Image (cartoon, rainbow, N blue to C red):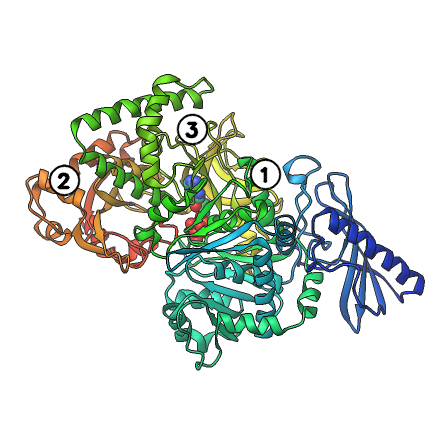
Amino acid sequence: MQPAHKGEEIQRCQLSSREIAQFDEAHCVDADVCAARGNDDETHEHGTADYHASECTLRHAMADTTTPTTEASTVIVENGEEIVKVHKMKLPNGTNQTYLNGPDQIIPADDYVSCTPGGYVKLRMESRGVASEPPVSVPGLLSRTAARYPDATALATKKNGQWHKITYKQYQERVRTIAKGFLKLGLERYHSVGILGFNSEEWYIADLAAIHAGGYAAGVYTTNSPDACYHCLESSRANICAVQDKKQLEKILSVRSKLKHLKAIVQWEGPVDTSVQGVYSWEQVMEMGAKEPDTQLNSILKGMAVNECCTLVYTSGTVGPPKAVMLSHDNLTWDAFSISERVGDLAPTYDRLVSFLPLSHVAAQVVDIYTTLMNAVPVFFAQPDALKGTLVETLKEVRPTRFLAVPRVWEKMYEKIMAVGASSGTIKRSIALWAKDRSMKHHEARMNGLEGMGCGYRIARTLVFSKVRDQLGLDQCETFVTAAAPLSPDIKKFFLSLDIPIVDAFGMSETAGAHTLSIYPKLKLDSSGEILTGTETKFGGAMSPNGPGEIMMRGRHVLMGYLMDEEKTKATIDDEGWLHSGDIGRVDSNNLLYITGRIKELLITAGGENVAPVLIEQTIQTQLPHVGYAVLIGDRRKFLSVLLTLKAKINTETGDPLDELETETRKWVASLGCEAKTISEIVKNKYPAVHKAIEEGIARANKQAISNAQKVQKFAILPSDFSMNTGELGPTLKIKRNVVYEKYKDIIEEFYKD
Ligand SMILES: Nc1ncnc2c1ncn2[C@@H]1O[C@H](COP(=O)(O)OP(=O)(O)OP(=O)(O)O)[C@@H](O)[C@H]1O
């Protein structure tokens, strides 16, 4: 890999007055370009630079047909410091662009990969189609949207029973004010602002302000322990950490002495103890920023480029410590553009989104922050206890038009609907069965390219499904998406039978969000979505070009690298720029991607058989609906075993799982003749009837196994269900296998002791 560099210096000269005049002319050209791009608002400066040019550096980029090329590039340096740049670029789509300064300029680079703070990368643009879209920076995008839709609602927060809304113009003003506040607090270029809290207006503003001020926005999961917070803040050289409340503040204070770069902590909610050195309230930083002149901020924006890093996304850490994925402006804004193109008709006057998934995760970030910003769509914030039960209330109020959830959220909804269905009378149940049958037939026909089922379906839709959708707050929703982990086809089928077609989006932190997204009716229940236009996919080690093999991806959404980790970067992005996903999959003739396993999760039994655990775990869960989680064991072991949790009630205050069985689980246990009310009773008493029922469920699942080695031979019921707080689940509710293996190593050893 080449070290990141800012271009090759080929000539130095003193600027003459004629050159200065030419430079002024270029200024005006840029003003036109800015206006054409919609950047012509009062905060976007052009044609006003106050400069005293003393040196000029000409730079050339390497010729490449799929990356913008620099026709001419001038850099004005004053007292050893670059103050302005003019780039005349030829984009692969044939158009010429003149960039005067940032933030939308492309700085010449000679590699697609860089893991150095301050490094630039080439852009993988195409001559036509979605990937030929001119790049735009995050500040450029905010300026453009605020200029085009100044009065459209951007963010809405519920306080004391009322929705408080801010417009896109106010959003931009607040971002700029907090950015100046961050600079005053000492944010340095290419250092991060850690953001630790539930989704809120302040989260969004801190994120964009960090980027405007030339730093890196780095979301930190609220469920992180103090040590995990330390890992994110120290590895990203955080100067500032923005925290939601006292609870998060205390975590940071407990590791603060070790954080070498940290200068300030900003708390946005609740009473703030500003007597603690270096702790500031949000309002204080707003006041600080409001007093600062624009000079420093504008000068940083002028130096910014679309092809440099603006955000660090930490991976979920499902198999090891989280890695800091460097995403450029173009990675994020282009992925948001590409998603918008696939969805097709996102509009500020029509669409609404509820933000509740953790924003530190890339899926929520690209959809909730960037796709909405790109299309001036309003975002409504859910309550912090959304996943503990209040989400549906918010959905009912906001009635979003698009809804993205991770599999566990869909699974919880499924469980709720099943519970309601089980307690309804016979007549209602038969109407529901008839309606579901109509819906399945209708959607199966549509998915196979045929006409829908007409009259019966329409009656079912009016009489039954509209009520279900009302109950979920999804009556106006047009796009239902699952992302971040596999969702079982059975759950998708269940929702389809309720007239809710869930489409899949597959992606990674390393692809700035989505690499696939299906749009109804182009979907298959076992597929992970249609590959986004303008991206490339191939399958490593495959016998056929369509896989199965390791999914490898290329495009403008592929990460720059892992921050300051050349070894991991090299291991993940090969010399031709292909990102090795670690997932195994194939593609069909409709460009739908199917994921069949994860290399990093693959179990290789002592007999040498490769076993992908997710499918087997899902099959067991389908056979045993009262099992919360199933975790397959068998790596380097003689046979497969499985750890099971039983569904338990949740402490709604803390989110911790309780010992008490969920109502439906208790009913199931009672139907087997057991009186148990808690998991501990079941674990302690080892009721033969419960064990027999589980054995039978596993035996049914084993019938679907593709070989004897893929059959599960032993199981154990764990003493507690999983949760984020107790560490077995990651922030998107994916199982952290290493945590489960470590926590239950004694039970695992017991399986194999003979
Ligand atoms: N729609 C989907 N269907 C199936 N799997 C998915 C889907 N979307 C994402 N994934 C899985 O999630 C992975 C990306 O998740 P993420 O970027 O959060 O990091 P991670 O791989 O979970 O964490 P780490 O790399 O730290 O272990 C993908 O590689 C894939 O295995």
In the rendered image, the vertical position of residue 565 relative to residue 687, given as above or below: below
Q: Quadrant of residue 54?
A: bottom right
What residue is shown with label 1?
535
- Residue at the spot 20% in from the left edge and 42% down from the top edge: 714
Disc 1 packing (10 Å; few <14; some 14–19; many ≥20): many
Q: What residue type is labelled 2?
A: Trp
In the rendered image, the vertical position of residue 220 relative to residue 570, given as above or below: below
Whether disc 2's CB lies below 8 Å from ligand 1 is answered no
Image depth: mark 1 or mark 3 in front = 3
Disc 1 to disc 3, C-alpha distance:
21 Å
> Along the horizontal axis of the image, is 575 left or right of 666?
right
Q: Which amino acid does label 1 sit on?
A: Thr
- Residue at the spot 51% in from the left edge and 58% down from the top edge: 204
Residue 183 in sight in this render:
no
Q: What element carries label 2?
A: helix
Q: What element carries label 3?
A: loop
What residue is shown with label 3?
524
